[in-house]
Image (tube, grey):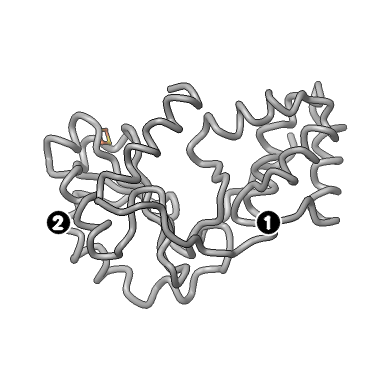
Amino acid sequence: MTSDERLGREQRDSTACGRAAGPRATSGSTSGLSEAVRARVGLLAVSLPTKRAALVPALWAVQEAEGWISGEALAEVAAMLDVAPADAEGVASFYFLFSRKPTGRRVIDVCDNLVCGASGGAQLLADLCARLGIAPGETTADGRFTVRRQECIAACHQAPAVQVDLEYRGPVASADALLAELAGADEEAPAVGGGRAIVLDVP
Ligand code: FES
């Protein structure tokens, strides 16, 4: 899926629950890179065969630290790696694991692709949105949850499947059951990063 197609889908999603985009959670920095992340990107740049090869792990380092990738951070990473800003934007927008806006403490990715869709995935997504008062792609005003619509997440045997902070769950009986399972747990999750860190070590 191209970035334009993804953008178009997000725009359609915003109206899927009958609600325009609302206020976002504000976790994470809105400025450029912290010293720690800048050092990490610098290390990646000299540890991989080419600077460009460091782009994905560098973006992930930003995501881990801030919970999302701001425009300023993206531009700084691109400059450090001698990558055109448009190329960096293309990579950051292609992979759904990269968020270009702040997320909640728990990130719920709901698959509504073929198998999950036929098993109630679309209804699950709609019910989650309704229960939380947001549209797909949005974060609750209290910053607890972000709900995102996803294509197949390779868990068709668990349909309807979701990922909560990248951990698979399914089959999910209902939105209420999932939210009951998550009740209170989000308060123990870190304020940024979607509650789970993935470490991409330098080879
Ligand atoms: S269709 Fe949902 S995980 Fe494959």
Quarter of the picture holding the C terminus:
top right
Residue highlighted by disc 1: 65
**Could you tell me which residue is drawn at 27 percent across and 56 percent down?**
129
Label 2 or label 1, whichever comes before in sequence order: 1
For the point 44% across and 55% down, the residue is 165
- Specify the label residue 100 is tagged with: none
For badge 1, the amino acid type reads Ala
Residue at image x 63%, y 53%? 64
Name the residue nearer the viewer: 173 or 89. Answer: 89
- Report the side of 194 relative to 161 (left or right): right
Q: Which quadrant of the figure has residue 98? A: top right
What secondary structure is marked by label 1? Answer: helix
Q: In the rendering, at what x and y percent does residue 143 appear?
A: 47, 68
**Residue underneath mark 2:** 173
Q: What percent of the width, then of the height, locates residue 169?
A: 29, 52
The answer to which quarter of the image holds residue 34 is bottom right
Residue displayed at 17% across by 36% down: 117
